[in-house]
Amino acid sequence: MTTTIYVPCDSAARSVGADEVAAAVVREAAGRDVRLVRTGSRGMLWLEPLVEVETPEGRVGFGPMSPAEVPELLARLGDDRSLRGHERHLGLVEELPWMAAQQRLCMRRVGVTDPLSADDYLAHGGLEGLRRALEMSPAAVVDEVTGSGLRGRGGAGFPAGIKWRTVLDTPADMKFVCCNADEGDSGTFADRMLMEGDPFCLIEGMTIAAHATGATEGYVYVRSEYPDAVRTLRQAIEVAYARGWLGEDVLGSGLSFDLFVRVGAGAYICGEETSMLDSLEGKRGMVRAKPPIPAISGLFGKPTLVHNVLTLASVPAILDGGAAAYQALGSKDSRGTQVFQLAGNIARGGVFETAFGMTLHELIHEFGGGTRSGRPVRAVQVGGPLGAYLPADGLDIPLDYESFTAAKAMLGHGGIVVFDDTVDMARMARFALEFCAEESCGKCTPCRVGSVRGVETIDKIVAGRDPDANLALLSDLCELMTDGSLCAMGGLTPNPVLSALRHFPDDFTPRRFTSLHEEGTTP
């Protein structure tokens, strides 16, 4: 009887030796009835490289594994009691607390299937959403997405159905679907993991969107720092064409949809939809003034549906299970699931998908295990480098859009970065403005100049130079950037600055600044 062994080919797993572990499995399996399958990562990054062995009870995990530990593992195959005696034995993967507590929709196949196996995809529910969508009219599909309550997973959480309806109702000789996979926020990696671990899910979501809006061409805009994701996506698209999932007459439905991958040049601003569109057109990524919105005049002036990876990856599950089932998950105005990414000073970092409503404290302490350093949590930033900092006593906040808005924070892409009590929050506030100055497209003055003046003003404050006057100036600068910037780059940069001032005012005094530097601590 063949024993199947699974080893991730995800970039994070490979960075800590997954390829070497896989090679050891192949080497030691010579002459044995063993099959190796490379998968995405389950998202428990502290356990990588994670090896899974198929048993009659289910897939049993071992990790973190090293190549030197592989021979003993293979020697124990065929004897469940012996397998349990292996030093790295974890138990059934699906029953591990991290996995059992999740509600996986976007990531349900990631870490489970071979990313480039069309048969694996079909065997695990793939294309069910697309098949159902193709039996419906475009307007009915839009109604389904609208009724689900799906909101954009990349930023402010704009209702997806409104975008879909606008593109559908705008007459044009050509329309586009664009996926913005320029995942540049600090502490975010779910887009990469999904593209590397289940690329067909994204392809299916974009094809459903094309049918619903009348688009005939699509682009996935991937950041250049993701070469493995680019390669996997391109290979998956080739497979999809060969299977009739893309191209002319998709699944015999009459739908024509072509899909392409384009690689960005590393500009953070291209995470903003109109800058991405400029880049796709071969221009420098610059923010466009709105109106017109991309749904009416987007790529090459045509109606364009723009979403990020997780938004589009949610669509197949919505069409497969129905809008009502999706809306049953979550809370008030936050429906379905979100993929949260735990990073920074965290004991157990990784990807955790759950329905909206779990508290930030529960996610960080019960599942993330607190800080990796063992020191107390002092601050948590949610939503990338433009997200607000929350203090340790403010973590009992539900992870949903409405609660974060009330707390003057944002969920953004679901990235969560944890800091312990050695962090200097004045330096973190300065970093936010410095980051904006570096990454601004330069089109609008509040962002381009305000960020530079903000860095200079914080330097004066922490140096003790007329702190009261400079604090007032910093507040004015933040207000100007919020109200006057063309896009979220400048408009949201004040969030981390003002939250640091609000929750950690002592860090902006010369005494605090000096003592931290004397101790040699770093953010």
Image (cartoon, rainbow, N blue to C red):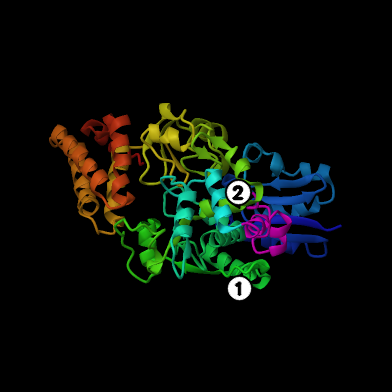
Q: Nearer the viewer, residue 265 or 15?
A: 265
Left or right, residue 58 beside residue 151: right
Label pair 1/2, CB-CB below 8 angstroms: no
State the image coordinates of residue 44 (x, y, percent, origin top left): 60, 45
Kind of element beneath mark 1: loop
Instruction: Name the residue type under label 2.
Output: Ile
Left or right, residue 482 beside residue 217: left
Task: Residue 132: say if magenta.
Answer: yes
Q: Name the residue tied to disc 1.
A: 248
Mark 2 crowdedness (10 Å alpha carbons): few <14, some 14-19, many ≥20 = many
Task: Residue 368: say if magenta.
Answer: no
Left or right, residue 307 beside residue 367: left
Q: Residue furthest top?
A: 393
> Is there any visible trace of residue 181 in the rendered image?
no
* Residue 318 image label: 2
**Which range is magenta?**
108-136
Kind of element beneath mark 2: helix
Q: Is residue 483 above or below residue 12?
A: above
Q: Nearer the viewer, residue 217 or 168?
A: 168
Instruction: Name the residue type under label 1.
Output: Glu
